Image (spheres, helix red, strand yellow):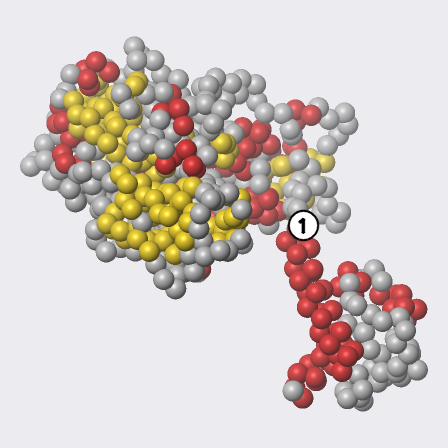
Amino acid sequence: MHFFKLFVKRFARHVKLFPRNNPSQLLNRKHLKKYKKNVFLKFLPISTSNKRYYSHKFDYSRDSKSIYKVILGAALSGSLFVYLLRSVKVVPGEYKKGLPDYTIEEVAKHKTRDTRVWVTFHKGVYDITDYLNVHPGGADILMMAAGGPLDPYWEIYTQHLIDSTYVILEKYRIGNLKLSPPTPKKVCYAPPAGLPFDNEPTRDPRLIPVTERPFNGGPKSSLLVEDFHTPNDIFYIRNHLPVPRVSAEDFKLTIDVEGAGSKTFNLDEIKQLPHRTVTITAQCGGLRRQEMTDKLRKDTQGVKWEINGVGNATWTGVALIDALKAAGYNESTHTDLEHLQFTSYHSAGGPYVTGIPIHKVLNPKNNIMLCWEMNGQELTPDHGYPLRIIVPGVIGARWVKQIEKIEVRKEECQSHWHQQLYKYFGPHVTLDNVDYSSLSPVQDLPVMSAILSPSDQETVVISGNKLPVKGFAYSGGGNKIVRVEVSNNKGKTWMPAKLVHTGSDPVPYHFTWALWSCDVPTDGKRCIEIWVKATDSACNVQPENWEHIYNIRGVACTAFHKIRVNLK
């Protein structure tokens, strides 16, 4: 207790609440007037009627109430201070006094690593040389703006226009942009003419955008539990770049086998290969990234998906292995070719390029395919028309749309899309110490489950004492969901959910989600917290908490899904 009181006394002296060496000063508003502008002290609860004297020989017995006031004030002020810090919006590119001014011509001289790479944003000048190698989108993308403005590119790729990106940018601030009047706005603000997003597809209004350009979005989560097969119109859309427009007549696919030459196919030639139709679940590698960010109040890099970046569909096409063989690939003689690289048709910002290990393709039961139909309908441009790759059990980032080229090669794909965007680092890794070469890219999806209906913080009217809860569960790598469990008491006890639809394919070739339902007892509560977890056929179980699986890329966001529901 003595130590506690001593701490309070020293705290009081530190903030000058109690005069230390001059007991003739009274604790009143006149004395505190000079501190009034101090945000920290401004909110301390101070009694104006207190006429006691305070000195370094403080009388604890008589002034315990004041001690508690200080404690309460400190707690409230500390909370407010933290809140205010977190509430401050980062405004990038504002003119900053004390920094040097640079002209556009001076910035333009810094276009290479040797001269240092400078860019501008609004009125700010930034030296981004040291950020090139850790930029999730790759150095080549940033180098497009070298010696000039970032503004036109961020007007196109609006996913950058968020506070977390601004914080990173301001770390590299070196000066202000000096503009000679009159200054045309197009110097820093106007995106280039002929925007690549001018010809985007028409989309269903039920799709909720996560980013507008490029478009990424999915439906309200409750719509996903209405059917085992997700309708095409509300199937989630993931675009890394503007959607390429390729006609069936102009479409060409080149398959290059290292050391054995290449062959080019048109769409009709691909369709002449043996067909197959299979039901496969697609899931974005960043599913629930927003939830991880919110729960930990730590930023993650990538599109901030909720729980709607997932869907299940039937796909019609040909086995990729058949197309590779038609191009001259021979498994028995090309044993040193261990990787596939997929390249999409060119779009603004370049083609999308990624890959998978070839061993996944060699077994036809893995159903890695070239597809042209989805749920019995021709693919839409957002879903890869006229031809796309599907890779069951693997993150959606490997499912390349508008496929133009496939390479069978010795070395793994080295594109920034493949080597930097989807890697699962530990919680200790930051953008300052990340080593992208230390890990292999994520392929198979981990076990996952989520509540799709009701939604978090929703108010539900119930007639009895049970709340109907529905959701999905999925696991990659060909594993099947064998159990989904729900808790209404924060994990003290669990009840089994009913697996409504699971698909019939056997393990290890099971690539469809499970839809589940559970009537959860409410125990007369006005507000109930519900948890869900899933287990797959390999005994993989979701982790309970976010803290242990945090990663800067925001992949494998698989902690127990927890929601709160208000009841009426």
Identified at 21% across, 51% down, the residue is 537
Q: Secondary structure at mark 1?
A: loop
Task: Return the x and y of residue 83 as percentages of the image width and height.
Answer: 66, 56
Task: Report whether 355 appears left or right of 3.
Answer: left
Q: Nearer the viewer, residue 72 or 299?
A: 72
Q: Callout 1: 10 Å neighbours few (<14), some, many (20+)?
A: few
265 w.r.t. 513: above or below: above
42 w.r.t. 103: above or below: below
Quadrant of the frame with the N terminus: bottom right
Task: Report whether 150 appears left or right of 353.
Answer: right
- Residue 38 visible, this orientation: yes
Identified at 36% across, 20% down, the residue is 380
352 w.r.t. 295: above or below: above
Task: Return the x and y of residue 383 as percentages of the image width and height.
Answer: 36, 25
Q: Nearer the viewer, residue 185 or 519?
A: 519
In this figure, which residue is indicated by the disc labeled 1?
A: 88
Dot 1 amino acid type: Val
Q: Nearer the viewer, residue 455 or 12?
A: 455
Identified at 45% across, 57% down, the residue is 523
Q: How many marks?
A: 1
Task: Return the x and y of residue 373 as percentages of the image width and height.
Answer: 27, 21
Task: Report whether 364 appears left or right of 345.
Answer: left
- Residue 134 visible, this orientation: no
Q: Quadrant of residue 233?
A: top left
Q: Residue furthest left?
A: 332
